[in-house]
Image (cartoon, helix red, strand yellow):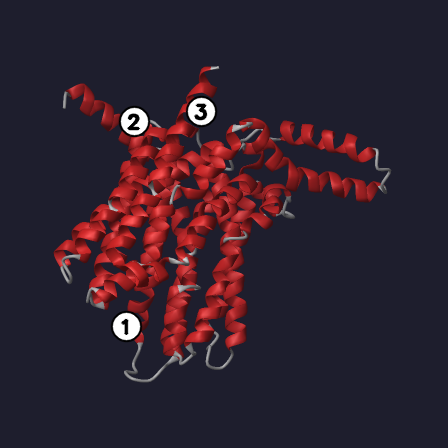
């Protein structure tokens, strides 16, 4: 590599020194902390407390709050909060409210023993889920509005880094903390879990301080909103409604209908192509991921090996992949990085075919996890940057919430049949099938890239 080429890459890496890019590290941490505390880690706690597996399985539906966040995203987009919005701005106001709610709900979980009052614990866990999903809505909108499209890859990379570090703390970290203060050996004790969850609640201070420090994005959105509301006002005026009802209808149009109408109007016939790409871009990873843990068990890997290699080392490789993806989006563009991520995500699934033929092979597992998580980090970073570029700053919260919901709907549905496929055809054929699932993604990325080029050249 020539000096000029090296200097170019070095210049691209300086994107991570941007203050708002750095700020996403702690905001990503704040977003990633609550998820496992109401999912996997909570399941471990409940099982240790003697709660039956059927109940634990049903309580996993608490996580559905994240899948339906688009339902109240228009409120986060449009509704001002008394005092807070005037003080902090519309994005930071919702961020602070949701973060404080998470702290209070996690504290409630900490002081509730599931053996004594499971219903109260479920209530607090639901509060964490809805507040966390609301934080995601506001944070995604802030990330999109805070910097130009060229920096979205770096914003996504630092966001993912903070998010993944928080997930390590919320999973392995909670278990280590609880184990360190647990004086009992074979009996359940609520005290260690109370202490661990209180530490997690205190850890949310990282996000709260960052929210108070960062500046509210200066986005000129009022003109578009005003124009859309005038269109609604003219149409609703012919209905001869009571003024209060008419004003409510105008507001509902601006909050619920205008964001989706705006997306269709801006992208025209390409809107279906874009939604199709969003719906299947992560399909090979998501479908394969459901069977990864059963695969590790069936191959004879211990819990310690899986925890160390997959949950800790694998997360580190994802962070590295995201950092590489952030540089690539600056250096070669979002669409090329998106295509590269799709190729790597599908191709690395074939490494699991190779690993299945080797049985219990720790070195092989390390190599496979390294390649798979590295490619996942690159793909995720490029995909988040791509989705961010699709939104209109006037409706960023609503539109991004819709995109992120569409992103997992079809993959999650297909993934539900993954166990049946493995039982019928085996792991090797399953991993090959997940690779094949990724091939249509390449076609859609290429078509979307051509459409974007044609649109920009007009």
Compare residues 55 and 291 and report the one nearer the observer. Answer: 291
| Residue 438 lies in quadrant | top left
Residue 190 in view, yes or no: yes
Residue drawn at 38 percent across, 40 percent down:
156
Mark sitting on residue 331: 2
Q: Is mark 3 on a helix, strand or loop?
A: helix
Disc 3 vs disc 1: Cβ atoms closer than 8 Å? Answer: no
Mark 2 and mark 3: Cα distance apart in space: 21 Å
* Residue 420 screen position, x and y as percent: 36, 62
- Disc 2 or disc 3, which is closer to the eye? 3
Mark 1 and mark 2: Cα distance apart in space: 46 Å
Residue occupied by mark 1: 180
Of callouts 1 and 2, which one flags the residue occurring earlier in the amino acid sequence? 1
Q: Is mark 1 on a helix, strand or loop?
A: helix
- Badge 1 crowding class, 10 Å Cα cut-off, few under 14, some 14 to 19, many 20 or more, is few
Residue drawn at 15 percent across, 61 percent down:
359
* Residue 85 screen position, x and y as percent: 60, 43
Q: How many marks?
A: 3
Mark sitting on residue 451: 3
- Disc 1 or disc 2, which is closer to the eye? 2
Give the vertical position of 453 relative to 400 (above or below): above
Q: Is mark 2 on a helix, strand or loop?
A: helix
Mark 3 and mark 1: Cα distance apart in space: 56 Å
Name the image quarter holding the N terminus: top left
Q: In this view, does 116 lie to the left or right of 368?
A: right
Residue 19 in view, yes or no: no
Compare residues 311 and 290 and report the one nearer the observer. Answer: 290
* Residue 328 screen position, x and y as percent: 29, 31
The furthest residue to the bottom = 187
* Residue 4 screen position, x and y as percent: 19, 19
């Amino acid at each position: 590599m020539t000096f000029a080429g090296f200097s170019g890459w070095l210049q691209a890496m300086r994107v991570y020194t941007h203050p708002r890019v750095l700020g996403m590290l702690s905001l990503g941490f704040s977003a990633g902390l609550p998820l496992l505390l109401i999912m996997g880690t909570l399941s471990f706690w409940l099982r240790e407390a003697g709660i039956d597996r059927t109940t634990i399985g049903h309580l996993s539906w608490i996580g559905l709050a994240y899948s339906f966040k688009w339902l109240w995203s228009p409120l986060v987009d449009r509704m001002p909060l008394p005092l807070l919005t005037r003080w902090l701005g519309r994005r930071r106001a919702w961020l602070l409210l949701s973060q404080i709610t998470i702290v209070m709900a996690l504290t409630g979980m900490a002081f509730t023993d599931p053996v004594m009052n499971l219903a109260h614990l479920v209530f607090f866990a639901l509060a964490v889920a809805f507040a966390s999903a609301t934080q995601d809505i506001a944070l995604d909108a802030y990330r999109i509005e805070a910097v130009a499209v060229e920096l979205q890859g770096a914003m996504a990379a630092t966001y993912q880094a903070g998010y993944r570090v928080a997930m390590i703390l919320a999973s392995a970290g909670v278990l280590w903390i609880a184990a360190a203060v647990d004086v009992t050996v074979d009996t359940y004790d609520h005290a260690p879990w109370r202490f661990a969850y209180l530490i997690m609640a205190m850890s949310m201070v990282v996000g709260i301080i960052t929210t108070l420090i960062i500046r509210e994005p200066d986005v000129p959105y009022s003109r578009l909103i005003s124009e859309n509301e005038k269109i609604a006002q003219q149409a609703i005026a012919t209905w001869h409604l009571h003024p209060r009802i008419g004003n409510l209808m105008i507001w509902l149009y601006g909050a619920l209908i205008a964001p989706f109408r705006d997306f269709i109007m801006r992208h025209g016939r390409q809107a279906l192509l874009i939604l199709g790409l969003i719906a299947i871009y992560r399909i090979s990873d998501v479908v394969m991921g459901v069977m990864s843990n059963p695969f590790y068990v069936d191959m004879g890997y211990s819990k310690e090996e899986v925890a160390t290699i997959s949950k800790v080392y694998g997360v580190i490789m994802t962070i590295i992949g995201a950092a590489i993806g952030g540089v690539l989006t600056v250096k070669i563009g979002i669409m090329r990085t998106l295509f590269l991520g799709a190729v790597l995500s599908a191709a690395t699934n074939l490494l699991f075919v190779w690993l299945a033929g080797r049985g219990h092979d720790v070195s092989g597992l390390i190599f496979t996890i390294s390649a798979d998580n590295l490619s996942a980090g690159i793909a995720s970073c490029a995909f988040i940057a791509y989705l961010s570029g699709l939104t209109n700053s006037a409706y960023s919260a609503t539109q991004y919430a819709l995109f992120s919901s569409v992103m997992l709907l079809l993959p999650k549905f297909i993934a539900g049949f993954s166990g049946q496929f493995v039982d019928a055809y085996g792991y090797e054929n399953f991993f090959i099938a997940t690779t094949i699932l990724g091939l249509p993604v390449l076609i859609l990325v290429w078509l979307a890239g051509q459409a974007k080029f044609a649109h920009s050249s007009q």
